[in-house]
Amino acid sequence: RTQSAVSMQMKKLEDMVGDSLFERGSRGVALTRRGGELIVNARRIVSLLDETAASMVAAPLGGPVRIGIPEEYGHAILSRALSAFAKRHPQVDITVRYAHSGAQIAALAA
């Protein structure tokens, strides 16, 4: 883009926001407080768009996953989480082992 086209877009953005977003001076252009607020949100939006695009082309998850968890946590927490996960990733084969921490550590070592 040409300098004049960029300047025109910056002016339109300021008009749309209803506030000055840039401080223009002899040393160039800097963001105002409102401009800083805008750029934080703009970066989040661009990041979300990048994340969305990446998720659309990413290969689906698949393969085995083994989870070890104490029995007292399994029913309250794990069942809902596994249900939601299975709907999003049907190619993943999940095995859950309920046991005390000592038994889980021994199984992991084995």
Image (cartoon, grey):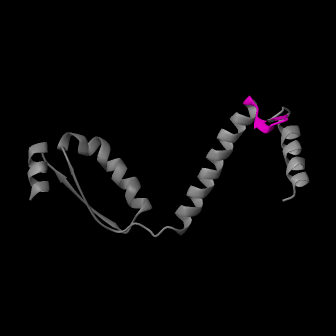
Q: Could you tell me how many numbered marks the image carries? A: 0
Q: Position of residue 60 (x, y in %)?
A: 44, 68
Q: Quadrant of the N terminus?
A: bottom right
20 over 53 or under it: above or below: above
Percent position of residue 19, x then y: 84, 32
Quadrant where the C terminus is found in the figure: bottom left
Relative to 54, residue 44 above or below: above
Most foreground residue, 60 or 53: 53
Task: Give the image location of residue 56, x and y in percent.
Answer: 55, 65
Residue lying farthest to the front in this orientation: 27
Q: Does 32 appear above or below 108?
A: above
Q: Where is residue 81? Give x, y as percent.
A: 36, 49
Q: Main secondary structure of the magenta part?
A: strand
Magenta stretch: includes residue 50: no
Q: Residue at x 60, y 51 (%)?
A: 47
Which of these two is toward me, 33 or 81? 33
Q: Is residue 95 left or right of residue 17?
A: left
Q: Quadrant of residue 23?
A: top right
User: Which residue is drawn at the image coordinates 85% and 35% (left, top)?
Assistant: 26
The boundaries of the magenta stretch are 23-33
For the point 86% across and 33% down, the residue is 18
Could you say which is closer to the camera, residue 26 or residue 68? Answer: 26
Q: Is residue 27 left or right of residue 43?
A: right
Would residue 40 be found to the left or right of residue 16 on screen? left
